[in-house]
Image (tube, rainbow, N blue to C red):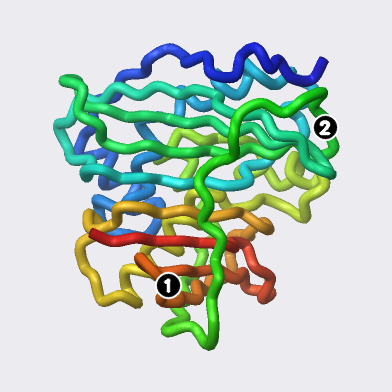
Amino acid sequence: MSFDVNAIGRAGDERRYEVSAAALQAYAEATDDAPGGPVFAIVPVWDAIAPASRAVASDEARKRVVHYEHDMLLHRPIEAGMALVSQATPVALLGRPNGTSLVIKTETRTSDGALVNEQYVTEFFRGVETERSVGERAPDHRLASDGDPIAKVAYPVADDQTVRYAAASGDDFAIHLDDEFARKVGLPGRIVHGLCTMAFAGRAVLEAAGVDDPRTVRRLAVRFSAPLFPGGTVATRIWRVDGGFGFDALGGDGRAVIKDGRAELR
Protein backbone atom coordinates (compact mmCIF):
# COMPACT_ATOMS: atom_id res chain seq x y z
CA MET A 1 0.00 0.00 0.00
CA SER A 2 1.42 3.40 -1.04
CA PHE A 3 -0.52 5.56 1.45
CA ASP A 4 -1.89 5.19 4.98
CA VAL A 5 -5.14 7.17 5.05
CA ASN A 6 -5.44 6.51 8.79
CA ALA A 7 -2.58 8.98 9.33
CA ILE A 8 -4.64 11.85 7.90
CA GLY A 9 -5.52 14.23 10.72
CA ARG A 10 -2.86 12.86 13.07
CA ALA A 11 -0.60 15.68 14.30
CA GLY A 12 3.13 15.09 14.46
CA ASP A 13 5.52 15.86 17.29
CA GLU A 14 6.17 19.47 18.23
CA ARG A 15 9.44 20.97 17.01
CA ARG A 16 11.15 23.81 18.85
CA TYR A 17 13.27 26.48 17.21
CA GLU A 18 15.17 29.45 18.63
CA VAL A 19 15.39 32.27 16.09
CA SER A 20 18.83 33.86 15.88
CA ALA A 21 19.93 36.97 14.04
CA ALA A 22 22.56 34.81 12.31
CA ALA A 23 19.90 32.46 10.91
CA LEU A 24 17.81 35.37 9.63
CA GLN A 25 20.89 36.90 7.99
CA ALA A 26 21.98 33.59 6.43
CA TYR A 27 18.55 33.03 4.90
CA ALA A 28 18.49 36.59 3.57
CA GLU A 29 21.89 36.13 1.93
CA ALA A 30 20.81 32.78 0.47
CA THR A 31 17.84 34.44 -1.24
CA ASP A 32 19.64 37.71 -2.08
CA ASP A 33 17.23 39.59 0.15
CA ALA A 34 17.17 41.66 3.33
CA PRO A 35 16.55 39.92 6.68
CA GLY A 36 12.88 39.46 7.55
CA GLY A 37 11.66 38.02 4.25
CA PRO A 38 8.38 36.11 4.65
CA VAL A 39 9.63 32.77 3.28
CA PHE A 40 11.98 32.38 6.26
CA ALA A 41 8.81 31.03 7.91
CA ILE A 42 9.69 27.62 6.42
CA VAL A 43 12.88 27.27 8.46
CA PRO A 44 11.40 26.71 11.96
CA VAL A 45 8.89 24.16 10.66
CA TRP A 46 11.08 22.37 8.10
CA ASP A 47 11.98 19.42 10.33
CA ALA A 48 8.30 18.75 11.06
CA ILE A 49 7.17 18.42 7.43
CA ALA A 50 9.09 15.32 6.35
CA PRO A 51 7.86 13.15 9.27
CA ALA A 52 4.27 14.19 8.48
CA SER A 53 4.77 13.13 4.87
CA ARG A 54 6.42 9.83 5.83
CA ALA A 55 3.54 9.05 8.18
CA VAL A 56 1.23 8.88 5.15
CA ALA A 57 3.40 7.95 2.15
CA SER A 58 5.53 4.85 1.77
CA ASP A 59 9.25 5.12 1.03
CA GLU A 60 8.56 3.85 -2.49
CA ALA A 61 5.90 6.50 -3.09
CA ARG A 62 8.20 9.23 -1.77
CA LYS A 63 10.66 8.49 -4.56
CA ARG A 64 8.04 10.07 -6.86
CA VAL A 65 7.25 13.17 -4.76
CA VAL A 66 7.56 16.79 -5.85
CA HIS A 67 6.74 20.01 -3.99
CA TYR A 68 3.59 21.15 -5.80
CA GLU A 69 2.09 24.08 -3.89
CA HIS A 70 2.92 26.22 -0.88
CA ASP A 71 0.68 28.71 0.92
CA MET A 72 1.88 30.83 3.86
CA LEU A 73 -0.56 32.71 6.11
CA LEU A 74 1.60 35.06 8.17
CA HIS A 75 0.02 36.42 11.34
CA ARG A 76 3.10 38.10 12.79
CA PRO A 77 6.72 38.52 11.68
CA ILE A 78 9.49 36.25 12.90
CA GLU A 79 12.22 38.12 14.74
CA ALA A 80 15.51 37.26 16.39
CA GLY A 81 15.12 35.98 19.94
CA MET A 82 11.73 34.33 19.41
CA ALA A 83 11.23 30.83 20.80
CA LEU A 84 8.93 29.00 18.38
CA VAL A 85 7.01 25.74 18.54
CA SER A 86 5.87 24.13 15.26
CA GLN A 87 3.69 21.15 14.43
CA ALA A 88 2.69 19.54 11.13
CA THR A 89 -0.47 17.57 10.40
CA PRO A 90 -1.35 15.74 7.16
CA VAL A 91 -4.88 16.98 6.47
CA ALA A 92 -5.79 15.59 3.03
CA LEU A 93 -4.94 12.83 0.59
CA LEU A 94 -6.48 13.48 -2.81
CA GLY A 95 -6.52 11.27 -5.87
CA ARG A 96 -5.80 12.98 -9.20
CA PRO A 97 -5.79 11.69 -12.79
CA ASN A 98 -2.00 11.37 -12.89
CA GLY A 99 -1.09 10.81 -9.25
CA THR A 100 -1.94 11.76 -5.68
CA SER A 101 -1.72 15.00 -3.68
CA LEU A 102 -0.91 15.11 0.03
CA VAL A 103 -1.74 18.32 1.91
CA ILE A 104 0.17 19.02 5.12
CA LYS A 105 -0.86 21.91 7.36
CA THR A 106 1.69 23.40 9.72
CA GLU A 107 1.25 25.79 12.61
CA THR A 108 4.01 27.79 14.24
CA ARG A 109 3.40 29.48 17.60
CA THR A 110 5.40 31.37 20.16
CA SER A 111 6.33 29.51 23.32
CA ASP A 112 3.33 31.10 25.06
CA GLY A 113 0.92 29.92 22.35
CA ALA A 114 0.44 32.97 20.11
CA LEU A 115 -0.07 31.96 16.46
CA VAL A 116 2.80 33.14 14.24
CA ASN A 117 1.93 31.48 10.93
CA GLU A 118 0.03 28.68 9.23
CA GLN A 119 1.28 26.95 6.09
CA TYR A 120 -0.24 24.53 3.61
CA VAL A 121 2.32 22.32 1.91
CA THR A 122 1.00 20.28 -1.01
CA GLU A 123 3.13 17.39 -2.21
CA PHE A 124 2.37 15.54 -5.44
CA PHE A 125 3.25 11.89 -5.99
CA ARG A 126 3.68 11.42 -9.72
CA GLY A 127 1.99 8.31 -11.10
CA VAL A 128 1.14 6.92 -7.64
CA GLU A 129 -2.55 6.22 -7.05
CA THR A 130 -4.50 6.25 -3.79
CA GLU A 131 -7.36 3.89 -3.07
CA ARG A 132 -9.52 6.71 -1.71
CA SER A 133 -9.46 10.44 -1.09
CA VAL A 134 -9.72 11.94 2.40
CA GLY A 135 -9.93 15.58 3.48
CA GLU A 136 -10.05 18.80 1.50
CA ARG A 137 -7.46 20.58 -0.60
CA ALA A 138 -5.60 23.67 0.59
CA PRO A 139 -7.18 27.14 0.20
CA ASP A 140 -7.50 28.31 -3.39
CA HIS A 141 -5.11 30.88 -4.85
CA ARG A 142 -5.65 30.55 -8.59
CA LEU A 143 -4.56 33.57 -10.59
CA ALA A 144 -7.34 35.12 -12.68
CA SER A 145 -5.55 38.02 -14.37
CA ASP A 146 -6.86 40.31 -17.07
CA GLY A 147 -4.68 42.47 -19.24
CA ASP A 148 -1.00 43.26 -19.02
CA PRO A 149 0.92 42.92 -15.75
CA ILE A 150 1.65 46.11 -13.83
CA ALA A 151 5.31 45.12 -13.57
CA LYS A 152 7.89 42.54 -14.53
CA VAL A 153 10.85 42.22 -12.17
CA ALA A 154 13.87 40.07 -13.06
CA TYR A 155 16.70 38.86 -10.84
CA PRO A 156 19.81 36.79 -11.61
CA VAL A 157 20.04 33.31 -10.11
CA ALA A 158 23.62 32.63 -9.03
CA ASP A 159 25.38 29.37 -9.86
CA ASP A 160 25.93 28.74 -6.14
CA GLN A 161 22.35 29.70 -5.18
CA THR A 162 21.37 26.13 -4.32
CA VAL A 163 24.42 25.59 -2.13
CA ARG A 164 23.77 28.76 -0.15
CA TYR A 165 20.07 28.04 0.16
CA ALA A 166 20.62 24.45 1.34
CA ALA A 167 22.95 25.64 4.10
CA ALA A 168 20.56 28.36 5.28
CA SER A 169 17.31 26.38 5.06
CA GLY A 170 18.32 22.85 6.01
CA ASP A 171 16.99 21.45 2.70
CA ASP A 172 19.97 19.50 1.38
CA PHE A 173 18.08 17.18 -1.01
CA ALA A 174 20.57 16.00 -3.64
CA ILE A 175 18.59 17.26 -6.67
CA HIS A 176 19.59 20.76 -5.55
CA LEU A 177 23.27 20.03 -4.95
CA ASP A 178 24.44 17.15 -7.14
CA ASP A 179 24.24 17.41 -10.93
CA GLU A 180 24.89 13.70 -11.41
CA PHE A 181 22.13 12.69 -9.00
CA ALA A 182 19.72 15.15 -10.60
CA ARG A 183 20.40 13.66 -14.02
CA LYS A 184 19.83 10.14 -12.66
CA VAL A 185 16.27 11.11 -11.67
CA GLY A 186 15.54 12.65 -15.07
CA LEU A 187 16.49 16.30 -14.59
CA PRO A 188 18.99 18.17 -16.79
CA GLY A 189 21.00 19.07 -13.70
CA ARG A 190 20.71 20.73 -10.28
CA ILE A 191 17.50 22.69 -9.73
CA VAL A 192 16.83 25.68 -7.50
CA HIS A 193 14.78 25.00 -4.37
CA GLY A 194 11.13 25.86 -4.91
CA LEU A 195 11.02 27.97 -1.76
CA CYS A 196 14.06 29.94 -2.91
CA THR A 197 12.18 30.66 -6.14
CA MET A 198 9.17 31.65 -4.03
CA ALA A 199 11.36 34.05 -2.06
CA PHE A 200 12.58 35.70 -5.28
CA ALA A 201 8.99 36.12 -6.45
CA GLY A 202 7.84 37.54 -3.12
CA ARG A 203 10.64 40.10 -3.20
CA ALA A 204 9.65 41.07 -6.74
CA VAL A 205 6.04 41.67 -5.67
CA LEU A 206 7.16 43.98 -2.86
CA GLU A 207 9.42 45.88 -5.26
CA ALA A 208 6.56 46.32 -7.73
CA ALA A 209 4.25 47.45 -4.91
CA GLY A 210 6.81 49.99 -3.67
CA VAL A 211 6.96 48.36 -0.25
CA ASP A 212 10.28 48.25 1.63
CA ASP A 213 9.20 46.27 4.69
CA PRO A 214 8.73 42.51 4.04
CA ARG A 215 6.86 42.23 7.35
CA THR A 216 3.82 43.70 5.58
CA VAL A 217 3.22 40.38 3.78
CA ARG A 218 0.30 38.51 5.34
CA ARG A 219 -0.12 35.80 2.69
CA LEU A 220 2.15 34.35 0.02
CA ALA A 221 1.02 31.38 -2.07
CA VAL A 222 2.38 29.66 -5.19
CA ARG A 223 2.10 26.61 -7.40
CA PHE A 224 5.42 25.24 -8.62
CA SER A 225 5.06 24.43 -12.31
CA ALA A 226 8.58 23.75 -13.61
CA PRO A 227 12.14 23.69 -12.27
CA LEU A 228 14.37 26.76 -12.18
CA PHE A 229 18.06 26.24 -12.86
CA PRO A 230 21.02 28.01 -11.26
CA GLY A 231 23.09 30.36 -13.37
CA GLY A 232 20.11 31.93 -15.18
CA THR A 233 17.41 34.45 -14.35
CA VAL A 234 13.93 34.50 -12.86
CA ALA A 235 11.39 37.13 -13.97
CA THR A 236 8.22 37.72 -11.96
CA ARG A 237 5.15 39.23 -13.63
CA ILE A 238 2.73 40.97 -11.27
CA TRP A 239 -0.97 41.87 -11.60
CA ARG A 240 -3.29 43.72 -9.24
CA VAL A 241 -6.15 41.47 -8.14
CA ASP A 242 -8.90 41.72 -5.56
CA GLY A 243 -7.31 41.68 -2.14
CA GLY A 244 -3.71 41.95 -3.27
CA PHE A 245 -1.44 40.90 -6.11
CA GLY A 246 -1.33 37.94 -8.45
CA PHE A 247 1.91 36.79 -10.04
CA ASP A 248 3.78 34.15 -11.95
CA ALA A 249 7.49 33.66 -12.52
CA LEU A 250 9.43 32.71 -15.65
CA GLY A 251 12.79 31.01 -15.91
CA GLY A 252 15.50 32.11 -18.31
CA ASP A 253 13.99 29.99 -21.11
CA GLY A 254 10.62 31.73 -20.74
CA ARG A 255 8.91 28.73 -19.15
CA ALA A 256 6.71 29.40 -16.12
CA VAL A 257 8.36 28.07 -12.95
CA ILE A 258 5.63 29.50 -10.70
CA LYS A 259 1.95 29.80 -11.55
CA ASP A 260 -1.10 30.94 -9.56
CA GLY A 261 0.92 33.17 -7.26
CA ARG A 262 -0.93 35.32 -4.74
CA ALA A 263 0.40 37.94 -2.33
CA GLU A 264 -1.64 39.87 0.23
CA LEU A 265 -0.22 42.78 2.22
CA ARG A 266 -1.26 44.32 5.52
Task: Determine whether, in the image, residue 133 is placed left or right of residue 205.
Answer: right
| Total numbered circles | 2
The amino acid type found where label 2 is placed reads Val
Q: Nearer the viewer, residue 236 or 196?
A: 236
**Residue at 42% of width from left, 72% of height from top?**
241
Task: Determine whether, in the image, residue 193 is placed left or right of residue 243.
Answer: right
Image quadrant where residue 46 sits:
top left
Q: CA gap, disc 2 to disc 1?
A: 35 Å
Residue 65 in view, yes or no: no
Q: Where is residue 30 drawn, in percent x and y?
A: 40, 51
The amino acid type found where label 1 is placed reads Val
Q: Where is residue 96 drawn, in percent x and y?
A: 78, 41
User: As displayed, is residue 95 above or below residue 183?
Assistant: above
Q: Where is residue 173 drawn, in percent x and y?
A: 61, 35
Image quadrant where residue 256 sits:
bottom right
Q: Where is residue 224 drawn, in percent x and y?
A: 61, 54
Q: Secondary structure at mark 2?
A: loop
Query: Which residue is identified by label 2?
Result: 128
Residue 229 in view, yes or no: yes
- Pointer 1 local density, CA inside 10 Å: few below 14, some 14–19, many at least 20: some
**Residue at 74% of width from left, 44% of height from top?**
182
Query: Which residue is identified by label 1?
Result: 241
Q: Quadrant of the C terminus?
A: bottom left
